[in-house]
Image: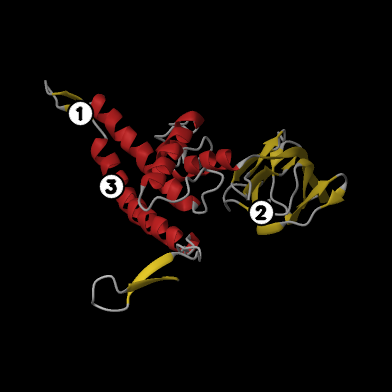
């Protein structure tokens, strides 16, 4: 199934899409101040008609000590490409009565091919996302940047695919669109990506000993990762190739055509006492 992503122009909430999983965060405000609401709910519509959603998490507060912030998650399974509207509702009560609050906006659902799905999924596996929920006081990875460009991830996917195709026995030359086991390809691409990072760390190795020893090197950590992933990738890939060959091979036989031919058979051990016949 093709990967679907959102191109959103909603200014009132943040939205993330990983494969078919959609997370929407909104903030209810009353006169510009974030407030908690009761009976929070939301709808997604297309062409003015509500659509059925596979809701994983109903609209609910993110943290009890932070007012106004709510989150919901759902799947894009069953949705078709096109323009959609999102509307969240809730009731805010104060000393002056009840107030119906609405947060709304629009987004476009696009469909992409399987190759881009592989690239996006590999980026997710590598935790190389621009939107990463890390407390700012603990932040080391810059969420506004990525470690690998799409082209690099594509190269790693093709390396893994070439690796799998080269494994015996010789069978179909798979492509990213045709290979039936995406998990093995993704693990192989993770191995090549992290192995490349390890090599780069070796290139960038730096150590300064005077007066205080300072070392810039993360190769050991990358090595531990890619060695673990390599073991989880290579053996299953070999087993898959053998299983694929057994399940897709068909029996073959050499059939000789039935053609009459001339034979000579002895009638006696005495010389010249033989005859000819048709077999």
> Along the line of sight, which residue is nearer the eye, 145 or 95?
145
> Where is residue 31, by image quadrant?
top right
Kind of element beneath mark 2: strand
Q: Which residue is mark 3?
A: 227
> Where is residue 279, by image quadrant?
bottom left
Residue at the (47%, 31%) spot, across then down: 146
First in residue order: circle 3 vs circle 2? 2
Q: Residues within 10 Å of mark 2 (few under 14, many from 20)?
A: some
Kind of element beneath mark 3: helix
Q: Residues within 10 Å of mark 1 (few under 14, many from 20)?
A: few
First in residue order: circle 1 vs circle 2? 2
Percent of width and height locating residue 253: 46, 64
Q: Which mark is residue 215?
A: 1
Q: Is residue 248 left or right of residue 221?
A: right
Q: Is residue 253 left or right of residue 32?
A: left
For the image shown, how many numbered marks are present on the structure? 3
Residue at the (29%, 40%) spot, across then down: 222
Residue lying furthest left? 210
Q: Disc 1 and disc 3: Cα gap in Å?
A: 23 Å
Mark nearest the camera among 3 and 2 is 3
- State yes or no: discs 1 and 2 in contact (Cβ < 8 Å): no
Q: Which residue is mark 2?
A: 74
Q: Disc 1 and disc 2: Cα gap in Å?
A: 45 Å
First in residue order: circle 1 vs circle 3? 1
């Amino acid at each position: 199934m093709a990967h679907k992503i959102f191109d959103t122009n909603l200014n009132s909430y943040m939205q993330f899409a990983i494969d078919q999983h959609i997370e929407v965060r909104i903030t209810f405000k009353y006169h510009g101040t974030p407030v908690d609401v009761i009976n929070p709910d939301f709808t997604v519509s297309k062409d003015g008609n509500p659509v059925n959603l596979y809701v994983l998490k109903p609209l609910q507060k993110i943290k009890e000590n932070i007012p106004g912030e709510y989150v919901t998650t759902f799947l894009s399974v069953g949705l078709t490409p096109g323009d959609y509207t999102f509307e969240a509702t809730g009731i805010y009560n104060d000393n002056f009565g009840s107030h119906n609050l609405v947060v709304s906006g629009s987004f476009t659902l696009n469909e992409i091919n399987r190759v881009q799905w592989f690239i996006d999924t590999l980026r997710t596996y590598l935790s190389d996302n621009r939107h990463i929920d890390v407390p700012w006081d603990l932040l080391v990875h810059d969420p506004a940047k990525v470690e690998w460009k799409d082209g690099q991830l594509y190269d790693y996917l093709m390396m893994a695919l070439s690796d799998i195709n080269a494994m015996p026995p010789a069978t179909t030359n798979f492509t990213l669109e045709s290979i039936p086991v995406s998990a093995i390809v993704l693990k192989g691409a993770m191995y090549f990506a992290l192995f490349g990072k390890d090599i780069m760390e070796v290139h960038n190795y730096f150590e300064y000993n005077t007066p205080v020893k300072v070392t810039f090197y993360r190769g050991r950590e990358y090595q531990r990762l890619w060695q673990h992933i390599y073991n989880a990738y290579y053996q299953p890939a070999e087993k898959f190739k053998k299983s694929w060959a057994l399940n897709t091979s068909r029996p073959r036989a050499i059939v000789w055509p039935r053609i009459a031919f001339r034979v000579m058979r002895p009638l006696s051990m005495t010389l010249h006492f033989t005859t000819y016949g048709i077999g």
